[in-house]
Amino acid sequence: MANATDKSAVFAQALTDAGCGDALKARCCECYEDGDWNTLSRLLQNQKNALLDKVHEGQKQIDCIDYLTYSLKKKQGGT
């Protein structure tokens, strides 16, 4: 766990917690240290979009399972 007084370490840990890979984490830390807030913001938004894509894909899979379960119950005469 990062020392709470070491802002760079806390930031790096947050990137890890957000699922950033090593390359993205290194780039974000570089932007953080350089004060390149525009690039950092864009990189974080891209990571968020990638995570949302995974969530949406998972939701589609859940919907398919729900449909299959519904169809199976209907074939069995259930409600």
Image (spheres, grey):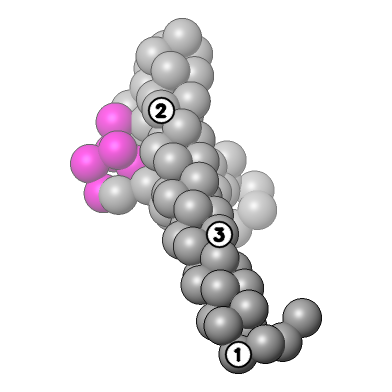
Q: Are marks 1 and 3 in contact (CB under 8 Å)?
A: no
**Which stretch appears magenta?**
22-27
User: How much space separates mark 2 and mark 1, taking CA atoms?
Assistant: 45 Å
Residue at the image position 63 percent from the left and 83 percent from the top: 73
The residue under label 2 is 46
User: How much space separates mark 3 and mark 2, taking CA atoms?
Assistant: 26 Å
- Residue 55, x across and y down, in percent: 51, 50
- Residue situated in front as seen by the camera: 47 or 31: 47
The residue under label 1 is 76
Task: Choose the circle earlier in sequence order: 1 or 3.
Answer: 3
Q: Amino acid at mark 1?
A: Gln
- Residue situated in front as seen by the camera: 50 or 24: 50
**Residue 76 is one of the magenta-drawn residues:** no
- Residue 56, x across and y down, in percent: 50, 46
Foreground disc of the pair 2, 1: 1
Q: Determine whether 74 is above or below 21 in the image.
A: below
Looking at the rendered image, the quarter that the N terminus falls into is bottom right
**Residue 26 is one of the magenta-drawn residues:** yes
Foreground disc of the pair 3, 2: 3
Secondary structure, magenta segment, majority class: helix
